[in-house]
Structures are given as structure tokens and as C-alpha cells.
Amino acid sequence: MAVAIRKPLRGGIHPSEQKHLTADKPIVKPPPPTTVTIPLWQHTGACCKPLVSKGDAVRLGQKIGEAPAFVSAPVHSSVSGTVVAVEPRLDPVGRMVTAVVIEADAQDALADGISPRGTLDSLSPPDIREIIHEAGIVGLGGASFPTRVKLSPPADKPIDSYILNGCECEPYLTGDHRLMLERAADAVLGLCLLMKAAGVEKGYVAVEANKPDAVETLLPLARETGITVVVLPTRYPQGSEKHLIKAVLGREVPSGGLPMDVGTLVSNVGTAVAVADAVYRGMPLVERVVTVTGRPVREPSNLLLRLGTSFATALELAGGLTEPAGRVVMGGPMTGVAQFSLEVPVVKGTSGILVLGEDESPPLASTPCIRCGRCVESCPMRLVPLYYDACARVGNWTRARELGVIDCIECGSCAWGCPARRPLVHSIRVAKSEIRNLAARS
Amino acid sequence: MLQAVVSLLVIGAAFGSLLAVASRKFAVAVDPRVETIQSSLPGANCGACGYPGCSGFAEAVAAGEAPADGCPVGGTEVARRIASIMGVEVAEREPEVARVLCGGGDREATVHYRYSGIEDCRAAALTPGGGPKACSYGCLGMGTCVRACPFDAMYMDRNRLPRVIEKRCTGCGNCVRACPRKLIVLAPVSKRVHILCNSRDRGPVVRKVCTVGCIACRLCVKECPRQTIAFEENLARIQYSGCDSCEACVAKCPTKCIVVFGQAAKATREA
């Protein structure tokens, strides 16, 4: 179907994209690492129960963590080898999480029962949902929400549209871009599977205008399947779920609501490819595309890494560093999480490993707010970050709540443009956490 | 001249009688006890009682919603005064003071990254790893509790640990609520011995991140003649109700994380 081009979102910013570092580097699949550390909690929801113990032999794709609740996703071994430890390890979000440490034998012997599960036509929606759950698939855009849960909305929330998110508005990251070029057919197939699982007729693929080659690759496939390709203006945070829905369908997710409240589901391109792999190859989620990038990285690249590969190994695979790192971030520069150890593993939510030079990440040196209002102008949620900052500094949580701090999506547009360099997102996070604490207390 | 005087008198009399009628008709019945209760309260409006300020508490007491000894700041004396106003009895209660159960300051605790965010413990606790200190249970050292104290009873020492000035502490508990690590407890003033650690990590992990942490060796548990030290989740905890401050455990602790407050405290800490 035809391409539709939409208006830019309100607010937002234009950070330096820095995608040229890796945009034309094909996805490379390096040999399996010698050791993997696979946390049993890589998703939103309950932590998995380990199914293996020290000394066990495991094979590639074998389930090693069982989901104990509905909102959870099982975890699989990303190599074949021997379990050397099941103990708490640091994960890239900074938590100590029970993890299975596996010494790989480089054989990559497949686990039993890894075989194609059927086709788009042969499987029923519940079958697809079950396959997605068993494959441990979560949203690969970064939030890691279990995909099966998303596909099971309550009966009073009818869903009519499914949007595949190929915006990748975060600077530096190019993993989704490369997937749309190299595995466009699987991405569209994955979207068709997701649409069938959710019982949805209308499908959209949303791509930012800075990826014309991806649009060209997707168009013929979209014509075959009746999916609409939507080209959105390049502007951060266009890839945010709520802004995507507004841009593609003109629907506004209500305050405190979810996309399903406006009859829409959104998944990332990487998720769709993982779904296609799970159905057509029977392969659970054991690897993902990670953009290893940044000025200090010798050979910035898009790597298909096994889950559990340490950040140190990932950086070595990208040729190591040419200058001392000022900061290592999981994800992109806007919403990523700074790391204090390179021993942390790649998890399902690791879209990139970004290394910033020392001059690119100076310590915070903020000055008083000059009330210029730039944060208000750039806020895509039409909020007032300067007031949240003021409220947080004096502990006036009630006022912050009245002013709508809970609706903040923490995109960082406000702090990015702040001439006083105030840590606005940090203040907002404090306010949100204190409001949650207050609610829990009363 | 006369005209002006008369007309002013008439207007004055008219408004005066109007006000007199209004004050009768729209009078709000106020419990006279509220004012007397409020005047015997400390007047710090600290919120420790759970009501909005001292006047809120006074109203609640007069209405029978709050107990006469509900003001932890005023202590027994205030409780007795309020009880006599209300005509009830209150039991003698020992005043409580805040104790910070962590001894890991800049000198003792290791740090695993440079923190450059907002200088507030609640903000630092939200960063990856729960703040710059390698111990995920210990004091973050940014003084949020000190700023929360309405009585100037706390300060940050040079080791970046909060200290409580016992004489000024009223046991209002504002610091207890402010601490994101839940390190501060209210304990009866007479209980001098405290285990200054909150880490639930196993011994070897604690040793790596702090020189004065509880390493879960249980020597104190075995030593205590009254069996009043509980041990769970890799952490020894004194049950204050049974402790008679005999100090038997203090010398046994290999990491010196059991501390006696008061005069002896200085000697233990500075040794």
C-alpha cells in the first residue's frame, strides 16, 4: 500500500544523529563467546525460576529459566556448554539478579525440539501467542515488556491496528535500520504473525524519513501484504509509543493509559523479526542486534550478539577502544543507562552499547534555572519540566503530581536543551518515585 | 459638622449591631480544649504525629481521634499535660531517639562510580546500582535526612555520615521517612548498643565493599547472655526490648560494627 507522510510531532528535539558511524555496516554474527552470563530477569514482570543448576550441560536454545507468572517471559541458553554457576550477578540496569553462567563449548549443539512450528496460515492466534511466550520474546525496543501479555488485551478493549515501530529515533542506534534492510521480509512476516495473534486487520510500519532505503525495501513487501508504510519526519522522540500512535493514526493515548486504550498495539521491528524466527525456525530469543558504537570505538558495528555476552567482549568484537572512555551506556544517549562495570551482560533490552569520549560526557555542572521555557517548548508531552525540578528540590510531591509529572515519558528532550544544564529528568524520576512511595504508604 | 458626627454614629451603630448579630448567628463552635492543647504542644509543626501540624493534632486529640500521648516530640511531659486537659491517663513512655544504622562513610565504604547527579540520597538511590557506593544497603551520604530534620538535631560529619545530636533529637521520625535506604530507626534513649549495619549481603560480599559491615559471623548472637540478638538475612539485629546494654557483644565483633553510643562511643569509634 501507498506511503503516507505525516506531520511532525509537537515539541521534540533534533539531537546530532551520529548514525553514520554504523548505518551502512551490515549486521555481523561473531562466533559464540566463551562464557555467557544470562540474567533470569531481563523483562518487565516476575523474575524467572532457574531450571538448571551448577554442573548441568545445556544446549543452545534450551529453556533455563521458567516464567513463574503471567507477566514474565522464559529465558533460554544462548550457547551450548556447561553451567558453572547460578548466582546473583550485576545486570546492565544496575541490579543484582540471579543469573546462569555458562561456559560455552563452541559446538552450538541445538536443544531438542527446535524446529519450525508452522506457518502464518497454519497457526491459530492462541498458537502464535503460545509460541511467542515459549520463545521468551519481549519488546526489543528497550522496555522489554513480554510480547504475549501485550497480545492478550482484556475483552473490553478491542484492538484494530498494529504498528511496527521502525523509527529508531535514538541517536547512534542503527540496529532496527539494518534489520529493515537485511531482514525486511521477516519483519513484515513477523508483523503479520503479530497481527494474526492479536486479531488485527490493519498493519502499519512506521519509519523515520532519515531511512529512505528502508522505506524502499519495505514498500514492495508491504504492497504484497496490504500493510501501510508510514514515513514520519525525523524528530526525537518520534519512536515513543504514544507519539507514534498519534502520528500514524491521529489517536491520543489518554493520561495514564496504554496504547490498547485507543485500540492499538505497537511492537519494535526487532520484536517482529524475533517472532518470525520463533515461528519459522523454532528458535527462541537467544540473540539480538546490538549497535556497538561511539567515537572511541575502533570499528563501530552492528553485531548479532548472544544474550549474556559481556559488554567487555562486545567492545573487543568491535575492535576495542582508541581513546579512554568517559562513559559507557547501554542503549542510546538519550534514554540509555550508564554502566559502571563492563562485566555486565547483553540482555534482551540491550539495543546498543554506546561509548562516549571523556570530553563528550563531562560531569554535571548545573546553574540555576533562568526560566527560559525551552524545556516546556521541547516537551513532546506538553508538560512543564522546570516546575517538576523546582518541586522535587523542595519535596513538594503533591504539586508535582498536580502538574502532571506522572505523564512524563522520560525522553530527555527537556534536559537536552536546558541552557542551565539542569538534570531535569533526574528530578522528574525522583518526583515520580516519591509519588509512588506516597501512594504505597497511604 | 454635627451632620457628619451623627451620620457616622448612625452608620457605626448599624454596622455594629449587624456584626453582633452575625457573630451570634454564624458562630462556629470550637472546642475550648483545642486551644489549650495546642498551647501545650511544642509548636514545631514537624508532622511526626501524622497530622498536619500541631493545630491539626490538637483538633484530633480534642475530637478523640488521636491519643493524648500521640506527640512523640513533646515526650512524657506534654503527654501528661494533654492527658490532664482531656481527663485521661497516659502511661510513662521512654523517649526515643534516631539512630543511623550504618557506619560506612567515605573512609570505610568503597565506591564503584563517580556520581554527578543531584546531591540528594533519594535521587542517588534511583541511579544504576542504587547510588555510587558499592554497598547497596549503606548510607549514601548526601544528607537528605539532615535536611529533613526540623529540629537541627542532625549533621553530616567529615566522613560524610549523618550524626544525631541526642540532646536535640525529639524522635519525630522525619529522618526515618526521608532515608531511601531505611537506615534510620527510632530506639529508646537508654538502649546504648547498636549494630551499625543494614547489609543483607553475604559476609564475603560485605567485606569487599565495606570495612565496618556486618559479615554475618554470628559471634555476637552467640555471645549475647540474654539471647536478644536476632539473625536473619545475613544480618544481626538487636531486639531493643530485651537488650540491657551489657556490651558483651561489642568486643566480639570482628569488624567493630557494634557501637556503644554516649561517652564510650567516642572511644570505640576513634580507636
Image (cartoon, helix red, strand yellow):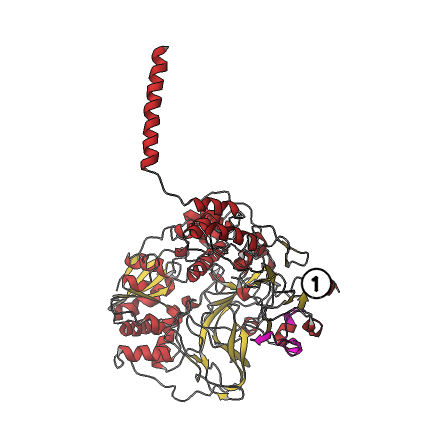
The image shows residue A243, relative to residue A351, as above or below, that is above
Please state the extent of the stretch shown in magenta in the rendering.
B208-235
The image shows residue A54, relative to residue B143, as above or below, that is below
Q: Which residue is mark 1?
A: B265
Report the side of A222 relative to B77 (left or right): left
Quarter of the rendering containing residue A319:
bottom right
* Quadrant that contains the C terminus of chain A: bottom left
Q: Residue B96: horizontal and vertical position, in percent?
A: 58, 59
The image shows residue A295, relative to residue A390, as above or below, that is below
Q: Is residue A388 visible?
A: no
Count of marks, rendered view: 1
Foreground: A249 or A388? A388
Q: Is residue A153 visible?
A: yes
Q: Residue A82: horizontal and vertical position, in percent?
A: 53, 87
Q: Mark 1 belongs to which amino acid?
A: Ala
Q: In the displayed image of the protein, which residue is found farthest to the right?
A: B271
